[in-house]
Amino acid sequence: MKRLSWPRRLPIDPYILLLLGTVALAALLPARGAGADVASGASTGAIAFLFFLYGARLSTREAMDGLRHWRLHVTVLACTFVVFPLLGLASRGLVPVLLTDPLFQGLLFLTLVPSTIQSSIAFTSIARGNVPAAICAGSFSSLVGIVLTPLLAAALLGGSGGGFSADSVVEIVLQLLVPFVAGQVLRRWIGGFVVRHKKVLGLVDRGSILLVVYTAFSEGMVRGVWHQVSPARLAGLLAVEAVLLAVMLVLTWYGAKGLGFGRADRIAIQFAGSKKSLAAGLPMASVLFGAQASLAVLPLMLFHQMQLMVCAVIAKRRARDPETVPPGESTVREHAAAGTGGRAG
């Protein structure tokens, strides 16, 4: 008999299942009173440690080497922090027909979040695109997003984003940017340890995100935030996000072609320029939105799963394209990369 194992091509990211389980736990057993204070303090520490790890992992040398392909990186950054936010602002016209104002704010915040790293690399590899470019593009986007996302939120969300205010920018600097810089400074001494134990530390940063989700959704349950969302509104949000993803996939692919990029670069631009990072967005939302964070991160969580499922299909089709697959070439690399495609980025 064959040994049972987790399906490699499961259409739902296992980490998303953990996130949904955490949301369910917060709904059934939300943190209250002193427990809420402990969870909030632990969440703050977890966020700082998470971005410290990000700083310790990012190789400054690799980032500088990637500057040689600056046109590609500028294109990805423009898609992530210009085109996406413009589409998010345009969705304001859907309030109150399809979206409530809190859901619109969450959708707009989604468009301000940096791109993914892991899943962009995995899908670019599966599709036989420019993997080094995808690595650098994702890293640059994450680095720029630590500063640019809160600044864009201050400009576009203003004082309407739940607990968001101009002071949140200072809080972002203290909780996210300072730990990140500390990680970069100490990377000379701890970088080797981080690389050797990246699987264990990967579990730590994913656990940190789960703690952030539990704290945010607990506070939302205690304050009755979820009574604002109906099944019809959720269906409307899903429809809007499906259109948003489709538009970005088309723009990144054909726009890159119009700019003169080759096929391998276009693949990297499409996957890095059309996705948003759940790992970076959740901690930022926790700081920026306070009590409204549970509603603010809902659009991001839904979009994250949607982008993984759609991009997995696109990547596999690109891999079978005659232009990218030489006759008789093995598909071992595709299957190897598929094992990493479900990571939350």
Image: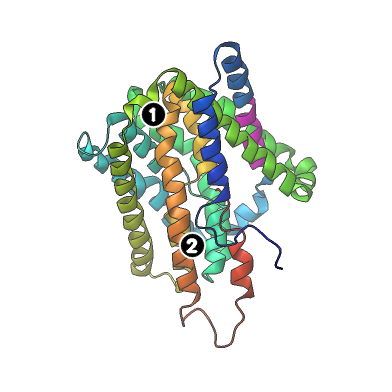
188 left or right, relative to 178: right
Segment tinted magenta in the rendering: 45-55
Task: Locate residue 71, reporting x and y percent.
Answer: 45, 60
Task: Locate residue 123, reporting x and y percent.
Answer: 53, 62
Q: Residue at x 72, y 48 (%)?
A: 199
135 left or right, relative to 152: right
Task: Locate residue 25, reporting x and y percent.
Answer: 55, 30
147 left or right, relative to 107: right
- Picture quadrant of residue 293: top left
Among the two numbered marks 2 and 1 on one chain, the one whose residue lies closer to the N terminus:
1
Say if 8 sits above or below 285 in the image: below
Q: Which kind of residue does numbered mark 1 sit on?
A: Ala
301 left or right, relative to 59: left
Task: Locate residue 2, reporting x and y percent.
Answer: 70, 67
Secondary structure mostly seen in magenta is helix
Q: In the structure shown, which secondary structural element does the residue marked by tag 2 occupy?
A: helix
Magenta stretch contains residue 331: no
* Residue 275 seen anywhere in this rendered image of the structure: no
Q: Residue at x 41, y 47 (%)?
A: 303
Q: Residue at x 57, y 41 (%)?
A: 18
| Residues under numbered marks 2 and 1 in contact, where contact means CB atoms less than 8 Å apart | no
Q: Residue at x 34, y 66 (%)?
A: 254
Q: Residues within 10 Å of mark 1 (few under 14, many from 20)?
A: many
Q: In the structure shown, which secondary structural element does the residue marked by tag 1 occupy?
A: helix
Instruction: Out of 290 and 150, give the one closest to the viewer.
Output: 290
Disc marking residue 312: 2
Q: Which residue is mark 1?
A: 154
